[in-house]
Amino acid sequence: MNNLPSSKPQSKDDLWHRAMRGVTATVIAQGAKLALNAVSIVVLARLLAPEDYGLFAMAVAVTGFLEIFRSLGLIEAIVKEPKLEDAQLTALWMVNAATGLGLAALTLALAPVLAWFYNDPRLLPVTAALAPAFAIAGLSFQHNALLRREMRFKVVLAVEVLFIGTSVSVSIAFALLGFGYWSLVAGTLAGETVSTIALWLAHPWRPSRPADFGSTGPMLRFGLHIQAANILAAIPIYLGNILVGHNWGAVELGFYTRAFNLVFLPLYQLVTSANLLAVPTLSRLRDDPQRFRAYYLKALSLVTHFSMPVSMFLVVMSEEIIALVLGSKWQAATPIFRILSIVSFALPVGESHKWVNIALGRSHQMLRISAFVTISFVSAMLISLPWGAIGVAASITVSYWLVLLPILAYALHGSPIDYPSLLKTLLRPVLVSLCVGLALVAYKTNFVGTTDVAWKTLSLAAMITASTAVAAASAMAGEINPIRYVGASIRALTRKSK
C-alpha cells in the first residue's frame, strides 16, 4: 500500500502559499549559508597556507566531479513523481546506496593515480580519506528527495545549513590544532555524517522489502538526463582545477581556488534564490505569453540592478577585498579575483535562460547550451594554460562573454521573450554599473592611500556603490523615490498569479 503523501498539494492556493514559504525560507537559509561560508573563508585563510588549499583542491578536483554522479538525478525524479510505492523507493535507495559504495571504491582506486599525476605522495592518503563521504551520502538521498517532494523546505534548508555549519566548525577546530590540510578533509567528512543522520531523523521513511526494480526504469531514465546536463556544466570548473594543479602546483592552485570561490560563492547564492522565485512563477504563466514575458523582464531587471553594481565593486576594490577577507599572504590572488569578477556581470544574465527553458519544459535546449559552453570553456582553458592561473581565469572570462549573447539568442528563440526587449532591459543596469565604476575609480584614485585600513576603505566604497546605484537607477527609471520603485518591483514579482 502506498503510505506516502502525494507530491502535489490539494489546491493551487496551497501550492502557491507553500512555494512562497519555501522562497522565504530559502532566502533566510541562503543568508545563513553565506555567513557561515564567509566565516570559513576569513578564518581558515589565516590558519591555513595557500599550499594547504591547493593540495585539498587537487583531490577535490576529482572527488568533487564524482559527486555529481551520487544522486543519479533521482532526487528530481522522486520529486516530480505523483505516486510512489515503498517498494519503488526501496529499489531507488538501493541504487543510490550501491552508487555511493561504487564511488567510494573508485575514489580509493584513483588515490594512487592522483598522487602519481600530481607527483605529490600526500594526495594518496588525502584522496583515500575522502572516499567514505560517498558511501555516507548515498544512504540519505531518498530522505532528502522525500522532504522536497512533500515541500518541507524548512527542514531541507535547515539540514543544508547544518552541513555547512558542521563542516566549517570542524575544519576551524582542526586547523587551530595544527592539522593543516587535514582540517578540510575532517570538515568534509563531519558535514556529510551529520547531515545524513539529520535527514534520517527528519523523515520516517525506511527501506523495506520487497524492492521493485521493474517499475523504476522511467525514473532512472529521467534522472540520467538531468545528470547529463549537470556533468557538462561541471566539467570546466573541475578541469580548470586539475590543469592548474598539474601544471603549476599546489600553491598556484590554492590562489586560484580561493579567488574562484570568493567570487562565485555569493553569486551562486543570488542565482539560486532568483531561480527558486522565478521558475515556479513562470511555470504558472506559460499559457499567458504576455504576462510570461513581462515577469521575466521585470525579474531580470531587478536581479541585474543589484548584481551588476556589486560586480563593479568587486572589480575596482579587488586589492582591498583580498587584503581584508584573506589576508596579506594571499595578495597573489588579487589579479585572478579581479579577472573572474568580470564574469559576475554576465553570469546572472546567462543563468536566466534556465528560468525560461525549465518553465517551458525545454530540457533539450539546456543540454545543447551546456555542451556548447563546455566545449568553448575547455578549448580556451587549454590554450591559456601556459599563462598559469591568471591565464585560465582570463580564458573563463573571455569565453563566457563571447558565448553569452549567442546562447541567449538560441535559448530564447521560440519563447515569449524577444531579443530586442532583453537587450533594452539590460541597458539600464549596465549604465548604472558604469556610473558606480566611475565613482569608485574617482574615490580610489583621489582618496585611498596604500596605508589605509582595508575595512574602512571598503566600508566607504560600499556606501558609494549603494548611493550611486540608487541615484542612477532612480534617475533612469524616472522615479523620484527609488525605494518605492524597488518595493513595487518586488511586490510585482511575488504577487500570486491568478
Image (tube, rainbow, N blue to C red):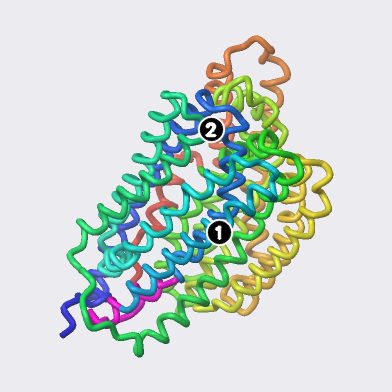
Q: Which residue is mark 1?
A: 109
Return the x and y of residue 333 as percentages of the image width and height: 67, 32
User: Residue 263 versus residue 190: which sits nearer the camera?
Assistant: 190
Q: Which residues are magenta?
A: 73-90
- Give residue 466's mark: 2
User: Residue at point 67% right, 44% down?
Assistant: 431
SS for callout 2: helix
Q: Residue furthest bottom?
A: 214
In the figure, 261 relative to 251: above or below?
A: below
Crowd tier of the residue under label 2, counting other residues whose Cα lies within 10 Å: few below 14, some 14–19, many 20 or above = some
Say whether residue 293 is visible.
Answer: yes
Q: Quadrant of the C terminus?
A: bottom left
Q: Amino acid at mark 1?
A: Ala
Q: Specify the farthest residue to the top.
A: 451
Residue 306: % across, % down: 53, 44
Q: Residue at x 54, y 16 (%)?
A: 456
Type of the residue with mark 2: Ala
Task: Tell me the quadrant of the picture where the N terminus can be found.
Answer: bottom left
Q: Name the spot of residue 270 as percent of width and height, x first.
A: 49, 49
